[in-house]
Image (cartoon, rainbow, N blue to C red):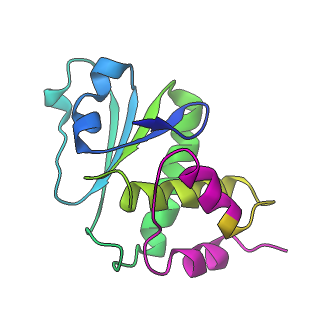
Amino acid sequence: MFQVTHNIYIGNFTAAQEAHLNGFDGLLNVSDEAQVYAKQLSRPIILKKLPIAFGANVVISETHLLEAVFWLRAMSDLCNKIMVASRDGHGRAGSILIAFIFAMNPNLSFEEAYRFVNDRHFVYPHRGLRSALERLYVRE
């Protein structure tokens, strides 16, 4: 797992299963095939499942982007450590974190938000992410 902001990290399925061992109290699982259940974890974690299909050619719906950004905003105030996880921790989790950084920083372009996340951990945005974010979070 890799730290992206002061309290938000990106991880893969293995890191998500071990989140409780590493002090996480929030977990956003965006994988549609990898399940993490609260009963698997030895301590309470705020767990959100937002299934997104595997593959960089899959367009992430604007509804999913808005829901993920909203959840991360809310949990940033409640949790000390939050992980955004997908199977490999590159595509879906990376796209969600790019969306979060873009939404929270209206001074950043899409490229700057992408670089901010990618400089911390290799990620690749899903198809259509840039255009969706530019529609949802209009820049002046």
Part of the protein shown in magenta? 112-140
Task: Look at the image and say whether residue 114 sits in the magenta stretch.
Answer: yes
Judging depth in this view, the residue of 6 and 124 nearest the camera is: 124
Taking the spot 39% from the left edge, 25% from the top edge, the residue there is 24
Residue 105 in the image: x percent, y percent?
73, 54
Q: Is residue 118 magenta?
A: yes
Q: Is residue 3 above or below residue 20?
A: below
Image quadrant in which the C terminus is located: bottom right
Lateral position of residue 65 relative to residue 15, left or right: right
Q: Quadrant of the N terminus?
A: top left
Image: 107 above or below 78: below
Percent position of residue 16, x then y? 28, 37
**With 41 as the anchor, is 107 left or right in this view?**
right
Observer-nearest of 75 and 20: 20
Q: Is residue 83 above or below residue 39?
A: below
Q: Residue furthest right?
A: 140
Q: Is residue 105 left or right of residue 92?
A: right
> Can residue 44 be seen from the camera position used here?
no
Which residue occupies 46% across, 53% down? 122
Q: Is residue 136 visible?
A: yes
Q: Position of residue 121 (x, y in %)?
A: 48, 47
* Coordinates of residue 26 in the picture (x, y in percent): 40, 33
**Residue 82 occupies which quadrant of the picture?**
top left
Q: Nearer the viewer, residue 126 or 38?
A: 126
126 vs 132, left or right, is left
Quadrant of residue 92 within the rendered picture: bottom left
Number of marks in picture = 0
- Which residue is pictured at 53% across the width and 29% down the height? 78
